[in-house]
Amino acid sequence: MTTRRTDPFRYSMITPLPCWIEIREINAVPVHSKLAEIELINISKSGCRIQTKLDLRASTHQIEATVHVRLNEDLHKFPGSIRWQKEHENAVFHYGLALNLTEDMKESLNIELRSLAASRRIVVL
């Protein structure tokens, strides 16, 4: 597991936020997957941590995915790639995703995160 985190902090959800993941590619081969339920644990402009009962075997596959999340009112689709996977208790897997966001997406995310912080739904780590 290698971290490439460059942000000085992440925003951590007070309670994990239900959202969805869509797998776009496995080992550079396009796939069409259904949305699978996941939970968002934390997020920054460059990455996020999710949890799910799905074992994607990310340590042996390169996986490109899109996280679909409703932070406040708007539904956002954040493309990224899975960088690491860890198994936790009760067969729950945590994944670290490097997000590939445009400048507009980053600005929109910043606005949403500031609003969530103001409403005390997230904390800054």
Image: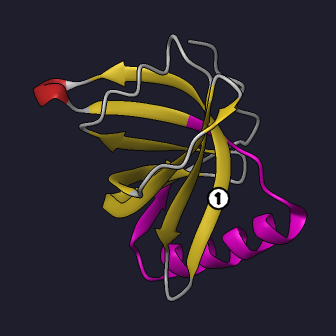
**Is residue 31 positioned above or below 5 on the image?**
below
Residue 105's x, y, as percent?
77, 68
Identify which residue is drawn at 30% across, 41% down: 52
**Is residue 23 positioned above or below 90 on the image?**
below
Amino acid at the residue labelled 1 = Phe
Q: Does residue 116 belong to the magenta stretch?
A: yes
Q: Quadrant of residue 53?
A: top left
Q: Residue furthest bottom?
A: 73
**Is residue 69 positioned above or below 100 on the image?**
below
Tell which of 69 and 62 is nearer to you.
62
In the drawing, does residue 18 fall left or right of residue 59? Answer: left
Colour scheme of the picture: secondary structure
Q: Which residues make up the magenta segment?
A: 97-125
Identify which residue is drawn at 78% across, 64% down: 106
Label 1: which residue?
78
Residue 28's x, y, as percent?
71, 27
Q: Name the image quarter holding the N terminus.
A: top right
Q: Element under label 1?
A: strand
**Is residue 81 positioned above or below 3 on the image?**
below
In the drawing, does residue 4 fall left or right of residue 92? Answer: right
In the drawing, does residue 33 fall left or right of residue 97? Answer: left
In the drawing, does residue 88 fall left or right of residue 32? Answer: left
Q: Does residue 105 belong to the magenta stretch?
A: yes
Residue 39's x, y, as percent?
34, 53
Tell which of 47 and 23 is nearer to you.
23
Q: Quadrant of residue 19?
A: bottom left
